[in-house]
Amino acid sequence: MNFILKKKLKYYTKEFLKFFNITIIAFGFIIAIILIKYKPMYKVSISGEELGYVEDKEALDETVKEEIREGTTKNIDEITFNQEPEYELKLVNRTENTEENKLVNELKEEVTVTYKYYEIAVNNTVIEKVDTSEEAEQLVNQVKEANSEETIDLSIVEKYTQNEEEVSTSELEVAKTNVEQTVETKVEEIKQQKEEEERLNSLPSINGIKLAVTPTEGRITSRYGVSSRIRKSTHTGLDIAAVTGTDIKVVADGTVISANYNGSYGNLVKVDHGNGVETWYAHTSKMLVKAGDAVKAGDVIAKVGSTGNSTGPHLHLEIRINGEHVDPQDYLYNN
């Protein structure tokens, strides 16, 4: 009985293997026929819209990005698809034209390119742009080393943009020259500012008002407090003789109170400087300002003349504090 069962089992096993082999051969034959006529490819779509077919999806992505890199600047930081392509494996007739170049061009329109560059700023003002952080650091270190004693703020700002036109970087040597020139200018400005501060600190002042300039150049002919046959009282100001038409400058910032003819003073310009301080400019041949005008120290406000009670062309200068005249030589022409 066992012998018969074994014999049947062997028979059916052989038949099964024969059937299996035939099935495999047939399946392989079918596959071969399919592969002769068709090939596996990926259907590429974006937002459900079919764009075309490609054999290698990874290679497609890389081709798109590589062509963008070759056609634009070297400052590309990232290339991203606005919407990621969708890939679906399909069997496509081998005779069908896949037009991969067209597909690449279409996908290039679906990407966003982010660029990166580095700005060099001097005292928070952008002066130059360079391509890499290494270039930026090298430039800044070199310029700082050459100006180690000056308080110049050199900074590097990493910038990102999706507008290629903003990436107008310079070659390192060009950028270095421009930054160095800017720093030299800034250093000179700082020096001049310090000198000006020192000058202002050294200026004479009245009630906190700095007297920045002398009103005119000339010879002192009559000092404050002296008596004269042409005056009823002692002299209330300082007379400086000069050629008619010589510029008269206001000694400090202020506002013109009046500019008109005033008896023995002749043509008289009065300027209020604040803190109770006024300056008067008398006997002028011509007045170049009017009441209400704001003036800066050094502005020409009149011309030397001999109007009013005068024996010759000169400037009569008065300085008044809270209405009381004081000696101008305590503050100006004191050498």
Image (cartoon, rainbow, N blue to C red):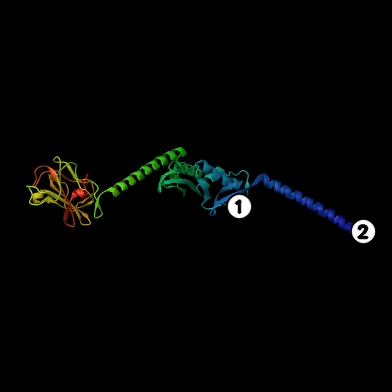
Establish if 280 lies above or below 139: below
Which residue sits at x=59%, y=50%? 43
Examine the rendering and report whether any part of residue 4 can be seen: yes
Q: Is residue 246 left or right of residue 137?
A: left
Which residue sits at x=36%, y=45%? 190
Give x and y (percent) for residue 81: 53, 50
Question: Is the residue under label 2 in contact with that under label 1 (CB below 8 Å)?
Answer: no
Q: Is residue 321 left or right of residue 74?
A: left
Judge by depth and name the residue closer to the eye, 272 or 210: 210
The residue under label 1 is: 88
Q: Which mark is residue 102?
A: none
Which residue sits at x=19%, y=49%? 328
Give x and y (percent) for residue 227: 10, 49
The residue under label 2 is: 3
Establish if 315 lies above or below 3: above
Give x and y (percent) for residue 243: 14, 39
